Amino acid sequence: MNISYNWLKDVIDVTLSPDELAKELTRVGLAVEGIHQHGGDFVLDIDLTSNRPDCLSHLGVARELRASTGAEILEQPVVPSTEAAASLVTIEDPDLCYRFTARIIRNVKVGHSPQWLVDRLEAVGERSINNIADITNYVMLELGQPMHAFDYDKLTGRRIVVRRAKDGEKIVTLKEEDKALDNNVLAICDAEKPVAIGGVIGGLASSITDSTTNVLLEVAYFDRASIRATSRRLNIATEASYRFERGVDINALKKASDRATELILDLAGGEAGEFIDVYPTPQDEVLVRSADVSAATERLTGLKVDKDRCIQILDRLGITTTDGSNFIAPSWRHDIKIEEDLVEEVARHAGYENIAAELPPAYSAGEYQPTEHRKRRLRTALADMGFDEAISYSFVDTRHDEVFEPVPRLMSEQIEEKFVTLHDAVIEGAVRMRPSVLPGLLDAIRLNLNHQRRDLKLFEIGKVFAAQQSEDKLPNERELLTLVITGSEMQEGKAMAVRELDFYDLKGAVEAALDAAHINGATFAAADIKHLRKGQSATISLNGTEIGTLGRLSDEIAATYKFRQAVYVAELDLEWALSQATAPAIYKPLAVYPGISRDVSFVAKRLITFASIRQAVIEQHADLCGSVEFVDLYEGKGLADDKRSITIRLEYRSDQRTLVEDEVEALHERLVSAAEQKLGIKRRF
């Protein structure tokens, strides 16, 4: 946000120099990243967080200076006005447009703006268009309220109807772009058609030109989520949408309209009509309770600020109280909701630099959570296998909705809205709490590939979120283990060719990680999973319960990330897995008597897995058969297209004696025959 020093001095009676002003604003949390000179003015570049839209104006910055310096805000001249009946304006969708005001100004003369107005706009990066358009931009930058001027004579029926657009309706914007609208877009219409996209941009057909004589001045308040969605959907970003989607002051619409009208009458002439205000459901004040804000400030920050000083700071910021315990947040501060927000305001202006560097008091000895030791072993095992641990953001864009299949037990199918949506996004566009960790890790893969690092193994242990069935409940959250691999690997110091990583590398990593955390008994089964490639995907189950998925990323998703090599991903519910009872570790002495191994190859249909063959052998309860292991898989020449050869190894051993050949052969024949009979497979000789 660019702030003009000369302009700011017209809004607040401050005597600080530009450098002093920058230091003071930075001290209270409005970081000034730079100062540059523009003609006889100085421009401050302020880096604002998304929760402070109230400072996207010179008045907003002035309010901060009033709280920190005690300087008085200077009132700007406004035209006196009276209100009229609202027959000119109809709001059909009050859930998207909370308030709409209008005023007709007749017999104006459109032309060039005076030099002082051009200089003010150019100083903060805006270009001059004409005196009417410049005034609407000027008031937006001064007071923080976007507004729009229509050529009143170009409005069919001389009416304004605020409604959802009809599917198929179109509009040519002020940027001369054709935009197709749908029922999700809020449109400002005349009696027949859209003349503006509400809160985003005006239409070319009703714009102000040199021949305009009568102006309809719109100042409104729109639903923030609707403006954000419309701006993204239509790919239109404007100064107005930037402010509306973060939140403006619903109670300042008349002040902004009066201020703009005063300037229009002064610079373009004309006669102002009555002020029309359509406000179907007035918004309630936000009441914040704090029994003792001074004590709360000391408890949360360590700062000792007496109660009178706390109330003075809050009052200068517009946060008023009559009894010292119940505070009313001003309508321009959408971020003030709870006691901790009051404490933050006091701490900012009392001075973060005064907070002592010390540990909080501890009343008990620290200890690990019950599962922490096992998670540390899991992390160590993955690091030993060449994995790097990643930490990605917990916020994702809406484009990831329904793309990745969430882990079981996270989302409830009984609710219409499954996702947790943020009202004030910390990151531009990232309005969802992540239902999957994969978007963050895939972004990390893409970043590394763009920097020519193609051999990657990453994992993350982090939480995912889903909405609860009841609105008054906290979101459902689970801690997941997520892995991604891509590229190739070569064992260090080994004279062997580079080998591409594949599905089984990922499966082995999952098994080794779970084993390190003493999570035993995980099984894998082929399955169709929407974000994974068919035929290279599987579910992960534990004790008969599905806990996750793994496989190769689908070609469609890989194409959106522009991956040109196979990427394998796994995601499983680590929280549930760690909650299961683990079998005790039973130690046996080393075998005294030798074992005998027998390999056997089966010709089986492709759907037959090693796990099913192993289970068929185990079900025979042969005590002398100590293990059943996978050896090899063959597909190709000599076998039908729907068949493959699976080689397994059975080991026979007794703890009491040495086995003889005949009994091993007899037992081996029984086990192999049982597997053949149950699964319909045949030995390959």
Image: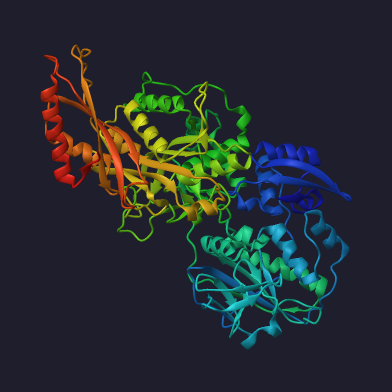
**Viewer-closest of 483 and 107:** 483
Residue at the spot 74% in from the left edge and 46% down from the top edge: 45
**Viewer-closest of 622 and 115:** 622
Q: Is residue 118 above or below residue 341?
A: below
Please state if 473 lies on the left or on the right of 18 as rendered.
left
**Viewer-closest of 72 and 322:** 72
- Residue 515 in percent (x, y) is at 32, 28
- Residue 263 in percent (x, y) is at 77, 68
Picture quarter containing residue 161?
bottom right
Q: Is residue 262 above or below residue 643?
A: below
- Residue 422 in percent (x, y) is at 48, 52
Can you see residue 546?
A: yes
- Residue 337 in percent (x, y) is at 48, 48
Picture quarter containing residue 481?
top left
Residue at the spot 57% in from the left edge and 51% down from the top edge: 562
Please state if 466 lies on the left or on the right of 142 as rendered.
left
Picture quarter containing residue 143?
bottom right
Please state if 637 lies on the left or on the right of 26 as rendered.
left
Q: Is residue 643 above or below residue 666?
A: below
Placement of the C terminus among the 4 image quadrants: top left
Please state if 265 lies on the left or on the right of 283 as rendered.
right
